[in-house]
Amino acid sequence: MVPTIIANTIIFGFAILLSFLIDFKRSIKYWYLLVLFFAIGLVDNLFHALTMTYPDIQLINTYVWNNNLIFNWSAKLYSVVFVLLLLIPLKRIIMPDEIGLKIRQNKDSRKFSMLFILFFFLTASTLGISSGKTPFDANTLLYTAIIPGVSEELIYRGLLLGLLNKIFEIRFRFLGTSFGWGAILTSMVFGLMHGFRLGNEYQLHFDFITIMLTGSYGFLFALLRERSGSLVFPVIGHSAADFFNFFFRMI
């Protein structure tokens, strides 16, 4: 568990360092938002390590798919509850609307969102088909269809993105969508969380393909969040990307 905590500290610490390099004055002014960003990110990712180290606190038993990927329902469920409970003490700092907790979409965003959902379906299907056949597993499909999209979008494109958006004023445009440094930094963190780790002997492991792929997906989810103003389509897109990747491996 210690190597995991150190790796996560490095990732979120690096994001904060970049924040000061991007805009030192505003990072100093809003230092408490960066502290929240760091602390929330660490605690959220600590749930995985805790539930793996102490199985008794698992709400649903963790299982390994295809001797490779660990599906940890409990960590994701704890993450969702954690973020939702945080909204109570943080209500004077950030409101639910500012992290995308609303159903109503921004004007003229639905066509953009639907095109992105189609893109996620096509890319995930292509990756799944090209990855080779694996045994059918209904539990895996249920997990990928529900929990990563909800928990990870709520934390990365929701709360963490919302906090960083309150710091940086500079905005960019891509595909007709306005976004800021928050989208870039959270996407970087998202990629590193999936492709960087420390071994038991504290050796560094980088999976650059995974970092680039998940970081790119994270950025596209962030664009959906910024364009629509809601987490609804980012969650749908994330779930589609995960589900159809595995589905087309199994059929």
Image: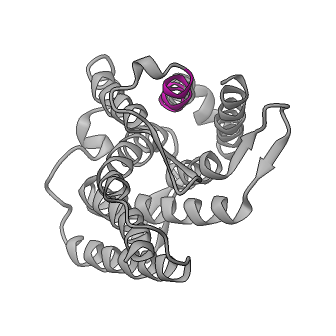
Where in the figure is residue 133, as x and y percent of width and height? Answer: 50, 76
Q: What residue lies at 48% left-to-right and 30% top-to-bottom?
A: 44
- Which residues, given as a range, are shown in magenta? 43-53
Spot the residue most to the left. Answer: 104
Which secondary structure type mostly characterizes the magenta part of the structure? helix
Report which quarter residue 27 is drawn in. Answer: top right
> Does 156 appear above or below 29?
below
Residue 123: image quadrant is: bottom left
Q: Is residue 52 magenta?
A: yes
Whether residue 176 is visible to the viewer of this picture, yes or no, is no
Q: How many marks?
A: 0
| Residue 9 horizontal/vertical position (percent) | 68, 29
Q: Nearer the viewer, residue 50 or 181?
A: 50
In the image, is residue 42 above or below residue 192?
Answer: above
Tell me how the rendering is colored: one colour
Compared with 23, 131 (above or below) is below
Left-right relation of 209 to 47: right
Can residue 147 be spotted in the picture?
yes
Q: Position of residue 157 (x, y in %)?
A: 41, 49
In which quadrant of the rendered image does the C terminus lie?
A: bottom left
Q: Which quadrant is home to the N terminus?
A: top right
* Point 56% across, 55% down: residue: 184
Q: Decide whether residue 192 is among the magenta residues.
A: no
Query: On the image, which quarter does residue 97 sit in?
Result: top left
Residue ID at (39%, 33%) = 61
Instruction: Determine whether, in the image, residue 108 is placed left or right of residue 193.
Output: left
In the rendered image, residue 173, in percent from the top left (x then y), is placed at 47, 70
